[in-house]
């Protein structure tokens, strides 16, 4: 699936919820379904700067696509990173760099987060794009 198709799927899913409490609960459930990150990735070098809670993000290239793994010590933040990984995991670096991440605004996520969590969200997206840029540079 393309990043755009995944975003449309996420927007559709969030349209089923009546209010933001239900959406928060769904995001928390997504966080619980995030695969366990290996302890070796829970290093300071994989911590995302700018997040209120601790968020670890690691990546590796497999073929021509990036595989991400992540975790957080905060359950809501873990759900937010799970949403981002759903959109960006197994995508080519160029597609990640070119992606317009509109689902965040369409589902109203940013406006329903505290300012510090919203800053963390921006930091997570920035870090994902930095990984994509690094891999694209290595690939030529």
Image (cartoon, helix red, strand yellow):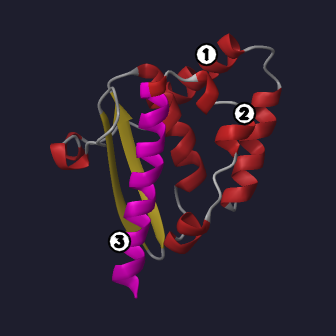
Q: Dot 1 corresponds to which residue?
A: 25
Q: Earlier in the sequence, mark 3 or mark 1?
A: 1
Name the residue at 40% across, 88% down: 140
The crowding category of the residue bearing disc 2, from other C-alpha atoms within 10 Å (few below 14, some 14 to 19, many at least 20), is some
Q: Earlier in the sequence, mark 1 or mark 2?
A: 1
Q: Is residue 128 magenta?
A: yes
- Marks 2/3 in contact by CB < 8 Å: the verdict is no
Q: Is residue 34 visible from the viewing direction of this image? A: no
Q: Dot 3 corresponds to which residue?
A: 134
Q: Is residue 125 magenta?
A: yes
Overall secondary structure of the magenta section: helix
Name the residue at 64% across, 40% down: 104
Residue 4 location (% of width, % of height): 72, 57
Q: Residue 22 sits in which quadrant?
A: top right
The secondary element bearing badge 2 is classed as: loop
Q: Earlier in the sequence, mark 2 or mark 3?
A: 2
Q: Dot 2 corresponds to which residue?
A: 107
Name the residue at 66% across, 11% down: 21
Front of the two marks 3 and 1 = 3
Judge whether 75 appears above or below 124 on screen: above
Residue 8 location (% of width, % of height): 77, 47
Name the outermost residue toward the front. 115
Front of the two marks 1 and 2 = 2
* Residue 122 appears left or right of 138: right
- Marks 3/1 in contact by CB < 8 Å: the verdict is no
Residue 32 location (% of width, % of height): 48, 25
* Mark-to-mark CA distance, 1 and 2: 14 Å
The magenta stretch is 116-140
Q: Residue 43 sits in which quadrant?
A: top left
Judge whether 23 appears above or below 131 on screen: above
The crowding category of the residue bearing disc 3, from other C-alpha atoms within 10 Å (few below 14, some 14 to 19, many at least 20), is few
* Mark-to-mark CA distance, 3 and 1: 34 Å
């Amino acid at each position: 699936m393309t990043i755009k198709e995944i975003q449309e799927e996420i927007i559709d899913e969030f349209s089923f919820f009546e209010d933001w409490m239900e959406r928060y609960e769904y995001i928390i459930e997504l966080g619980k379904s995030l695969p366990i990150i290996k302890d070796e990735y829970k290093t300071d070098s994989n911590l995302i700067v700018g997040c209120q809670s601790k968020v670890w993000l690691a990546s590796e290239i497999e073929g021509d696509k990036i595989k991400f793994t992540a975790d957080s010590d905060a359950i809501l933040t873990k759900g937010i990173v799970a949403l981002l990984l759903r959109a960006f995991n197994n995508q080519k670096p160029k597609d990640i760099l070119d992606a317009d991440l509109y689902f965040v605004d369409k589902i109203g996520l940013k406006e329903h987060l505290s300012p510090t969590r919203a800053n963390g969200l921006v930091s997570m997206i920035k870090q994902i794009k930095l990984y994509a840029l690094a891999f694209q540079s290595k690939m030529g």
